[in-house]
């Protein structure tokens, strides 16, 4: 039976790449005595997939992974979660295991926070300039494509955006953006600020995924 789990990737775990994370989960399932279903053929692969690959360095508390076990229907969701967390490395933790027939294609939006850090303090006028930037009708940002960089207008892919000052040295940009077809990487919000408002460029930007949602704003599970 196909199952789904919700997990977080925080702390030192944010530096694990997507491919390494996939390998990590397969090892953890095996260590926990959980038999993942495999595909048929000459090169069988474990039936396990992560909904939205996460960039290295990005924190998340809403990652979705689908998997399927063989011959272990008697295991409760809580037992599966505990077995996985027992050998999980620091920064990766399963929050919930559950059954779901909601297809990944219904995951359409991402709720995220981009924290902009300024060593010398938030520049004067930065909040007004950044708010004005995302109020424009069009903001073109370069995006890496299969055939090289392409310009992309990010405004149509931003459902909502709110900026707040959280300390003398930090601004927090809270946004809900498109997650699939098309998708907006929150790092493009940072690129837009650097390109259009260079005087507002931060010394460091931290990105966090807070929640994944459907088109009507419902939490995706």
Image (spheres, rainbow, N blue to C red):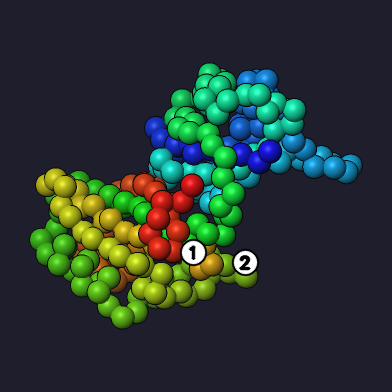
**Residue at horizontal 34 percent and vertical 79 percent from the top:** 138
Q: Is residue 173 visible?
A: yes
Q: Earlier in the sequence, mark 2 or mark 1?
A: 2
Q: Quadrant of the N terminus?
A: top right
**Residue at horizontal 77 percent and vertical 38 percent from the top:** 38
Q: Is residue 92 visible?
A: no
Q: Quadrant of residue 18?
A: top right
Would you place residue 27 above or below residue 164 in this image? above
Q: Which residue is mark 1?
A: 183
User: At which x and y percent is residue 67?
Assistant: 64, 39
* Left or right, residue 142 beside residue 34: left
Q: Which residue is mark 2?
A: 146
Would you place residue 151 above or below residue 176 in this image? below
* Left or right, residue 13 beside residue 22: left
Task: Name the mark nearer the viewer: 2 or 1.
Answer: 1
User: At which x and y percent is residue 17?
Assistant: 55, 41
């Amino acid at each position: 039976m196909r199952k789904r789990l919700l997990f977080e990737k925080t702390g030192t775990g944010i530096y694990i790449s997507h491919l390494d994370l996939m390998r990590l989960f397969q090892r953890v399932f095996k260590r926990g005595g959980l038999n993942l279903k495999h595909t048929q053929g000459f090169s069988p692969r474990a039936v396990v997939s992560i909904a939205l690959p996460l960039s290295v360095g990005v924190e998340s508390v809403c990652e979705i992974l689908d998997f399927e076990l063989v011959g272990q229907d008697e295991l409760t969701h809580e037992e599966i979660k505990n077995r996985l967390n027992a050998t999980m490395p620091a920064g990766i933790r399963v929050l919930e295991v559950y059954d779901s027939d909601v297809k990944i294609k219904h995951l359409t939006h991402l709720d995220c926070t981009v924290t902009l850090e300024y060593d010398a303090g938030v520049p004067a006028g930065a909040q007004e300039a950044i708010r004005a930037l995302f109020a424009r009708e069009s903001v073109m940002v370069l995006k890496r494509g299969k055939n090289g960089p392409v310009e992309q207008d990010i405004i149509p892919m931003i459902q909502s955006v709110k900026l707040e000052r959280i300390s003398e040295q930090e601004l927090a940009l809270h946004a809900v953006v498109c997650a699939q077809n098309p998708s907006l990487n929150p790092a493009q919000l940072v690129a837009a600020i650097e390109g259009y408002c260079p005087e507002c460029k931060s010394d460091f930007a931290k990105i966090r995924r807070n929640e994944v949602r459907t088109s009507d704003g419902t939490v995706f599970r």
